[in-house]
Amino acid sequence: MFSGKKIHEASSNAPARSEQLHGEERRPMRGLRMLKYGLLAIFVVIALRLAQVQILDSAKYRQIAEQQAQDTIPLIAARGKILDRNGNILASHSLFVTLAADPKVAETCAVQIAAELSRTFGRPKEFYLSRLRCGKRFVRLERRVHPEHVAGFRAQSFRGIFEIDEPTRLYHYDEMSGALLGLVDEEREWTCGVELQFDQDLRGKDGYSVVRRDAKGRTNPTVDCPRVESSSGNDVYLTIDLTYQSIAEQKLKEGIERTQAEAGLMVVMNPKTGEILAVAQCPAFNPNVASASGMESRRARAFTDTFEPGSVFKLVTAAAALESHVVRPDQKFYAEHGEYHVRLPHGKQRIIRDTHPYDTLTFQQAMEVSSNIVMAKVSDRVGVERLYTRARDLGFGNKTGVEYPSESRGDLKRPTQWSGVTLNSMAYGYEVGVTPIQIAAAYSAVANGGVLVKPTLLKRIKTPAGTTIREQAPQSLRRVISPQTAATLTQFFEGVVQRGTATAAQVEGMRVAGKTGTSRKLTDGKYKTSEHTASFVGYFPAEDPQILCLVMLDNPKVGGYTGGATAAPIVKEFAQHVITAGRLTVAARSTAQPVPRSSDQVTVPDVCNLHTTSAKKMLEARGLVAQSTGEGLVRQQTPAASSIVLAGTTVTLVADSQRGDFPAEGVLVPDVRKMSARRAANRLAMDSLQPVIQGSGIVVDQSPQPGEHVQAGAAIVLSCEPHAVVVRNR
C-alpha cells in the first residue's frame, strides 16, 4: 500500500514536469525570433532610407556632393593706374608671387629647400627651417616676390612648395608724390590719399572661378565649372606734372638741408585753372615701404594741416582795404619807429612790433616791407565785418573742395568770437588758422585777375580701353576782388620781390610777384620766440601768371628764420629750373632787359645748375658773352657769380658733358645708391648710360662708382638688396 501510493503520486506529477521542460525549451526560440524580427526591421528601415537618399532625395545629395568637390577661387581685379597729366605712370597694378609650403609634404627635403631659399632671398637658412618644421599644413615662406626673382628657385621643383599669385600695388617713383598718392594695404581694406579719394574708380570688380577638387584635394579647372572674369579698374589721370613734381621735391629738399628746417612743403598751381601741378613735402613718404614711415608723413599736409599764416595773410587786409576804398596805395601811415602801443580797455595796452623800425610808409611800402604796425592801423579802418567777409570770400574758413580726403577747413572765428585784439592780430596773420592750399587758392585769385578758382587734382578718368568717362574742367567759384584791385595787389607783390622782403626770389629775365610770411609757433598756449613758420608764395611771370608756387618751412635754423631769407630762395630756384625745362611758353616770358653799353659795369648772374641754353640767354641779356665747354647743366662759371665786370666780358661755362680735362664725349656717373632699381635705371638713362640690374629692390652698390668718368652708353652694374623685392603694399 505504501509503495503504491508513492507510484501514484509520481505518475500524477509527470505532466507538470513535462510542461516545465517544454516551457524552458520554447523560451530561447522566442528570443531568437525576436532578434530576427528586429534585424528584419532594421534592414527594412535601412532599405527605406537608401531608397529615400538614392531615389527621392537623389538630386539634393548630388548637389551637396558636387559642392563638396568644388572650390571657388576669387579672381582679384587689377586696380587702375594713377598717372600724371602727361600719361606718366605714378602707381600701377602688378602680379607678384607668394611662396608657400605644406610642411608635412616638404619635410623630406626641408634642408635643401631652406638652403636654396636662403641663397635666393638672403635670409638665414634657419629662418626657413623653422617654418618648414612647424608641423602645420600651410605656411608662407616669402611674400610678394617678383616672378622673375623666383625663376631659379622654381626650376628646382621641390615637393610641397607651391606659388600663390598676388596682386601688388607699385609706386613707380617711391617717395616722389608719395603722401599725395597714399597707399592701398595688402587686404585692400585700408587706403589713404588719392588711392582712397578715387577708390571706387580704381578698384574694379573682382571675379571668381569654380574649380573641381579630386580625391587627393588637388584642384583643377574644368570647362563645365562657372567662371566670372574680373573687371579692371579705371585709370585716374591727375593734374600733377611729373617734371614740376621732380623739381619741387628736389628744390624743397635742398632748401630744408640748407636751412636745417624740421620739415617743409611746396604747392605748385596753375592760378588760372586751379590745377595742382606739384605737391611736395619733407619728410617724404614712400608707399612702397610704408612701414618705414610714421603715420604723420602719410598725409599730404598741404591739404590737412592748419597753420597761423603770418604776413601772407596780409593779402586779406589789403584786399579788404582796397575794395572798401578806405585806403589808397600811396596813402601814408606813421610806422611808430617799429613799436606801436595800442590801448586796451581797463587800462591795459598791447605792443605791436615790426622787424625793422620805420618812420612813415605808404600803404604799398608797408606791404613791401611787411609792416605789422601799418596793417594793424589799416585794419582799424576796414573794420571787423569787412575783414571777416573778405577772408570768407577768399576761401578761408571753408574747404577748397580739392579731391583729397580729410581736407581741413581751417579756423576762422566768427566776429562774435573775436576779442578786443583779434582785428589787429588777424590783420597780419595771427588768431587765424589756414591750410597751405587755401593760401595758394587765395593768391591765385589775385594772379588771375580776381576770380577764386577751385583747386583740383583730377584731370580725367579713363577706362582700361582708353575711353574717357570723366573730364575735369576748371571751376570758377566766384569773383572775390575787382580786376583793378587784383592789378594793384600784383603791383604790391612785385614790389615785395623787387625792393621788399623777398629780393631773394628775383629771377633774371622774368617778373615775379609774391609775399613773404613769418609767424611764431604757438606751443602750449604760448608763442615761442625761437620757433617759426616761414613761408613765401609767388607767381610768375607777373604780367601773365602761369605758375604759382607756395613754400612753407617748419622752424628753419640756418640762414635766418624769415620767409624772405629761407622760403623765397626755394621758389627762385624752382622758377629757374622750370625755365630750364622749357615749360613756360615764349609769350609768357618777360622780355629781356636792354643790353648794357660796353662802358657799363655788369654784375655776373649765377647760372650754375641751369642748362647751357638758358644760361647763355641770361648772360646775353646782361650784355655778357657766353662761351661753354660742353652742353648740359652748368657746373662752373668764370667769372664767378656776383662779380662786377664790364659789359661784353666773356663768361666761360663748364657743363656736365665736359669738365676739366675730360673729353667732350664723356659722362660722369651719377650716384644712384639708395634709389629703387626702377628709379636708378631712369636716372642713368637721362645721362645716356645703360643700367645692368642684378637683383631687384634698392640699389646698395654700383659699378663704376659715382663720380667716375665713362663713355656715353657705358654699362652701369647695379647691385640691389634682395630683401627689397618683398613689397608690402598694394
Image (spheres, helix red, strand yellow):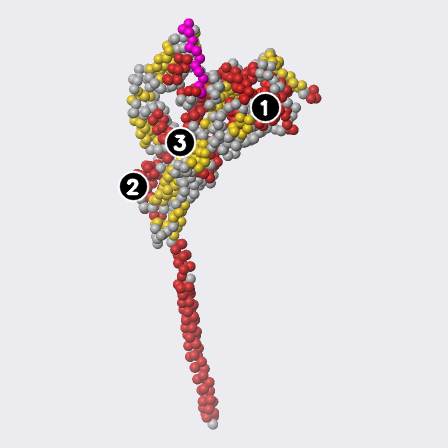
Asked if the magenta segment contains residue 594, the reply would be: yes
The spot of residue 148 in percent (x, y) is 33, 37
Check disc 3: other Cα within 10 Å, few if <14, some if 14-19, many if 20+.
few
Q: Give the SS element for disc 1.
A: loop
**Which of the two discs, 3 and 1, sits closer to the camera?**
3
Asked if the magenta segment contains residue 458, the reply would be: no
Above or below, comparing residue 356 to residue 106 in the picture: above
Q: In the orientation shown, which residue stands out farthest toward the top? A: 599
User: Would residue 168 be seen by someone viewing this image from the given angle?
Assistant: no
The spot of residue 98 in percent (x, y) is 37, 41
User: Would residue 156 be seen by someone viewing this image from the given angle?
Assistant: yes
Q: Give the SS element for disc 2.
A: loop
| Residue behind mark 1 | 430
**Residue 313 versus residue 490: which sits nearer the camera?**
490
| Residue behind mark 3 | 87
Residue range in magenta is: 588-599
| Residue behind mark 2 | 155
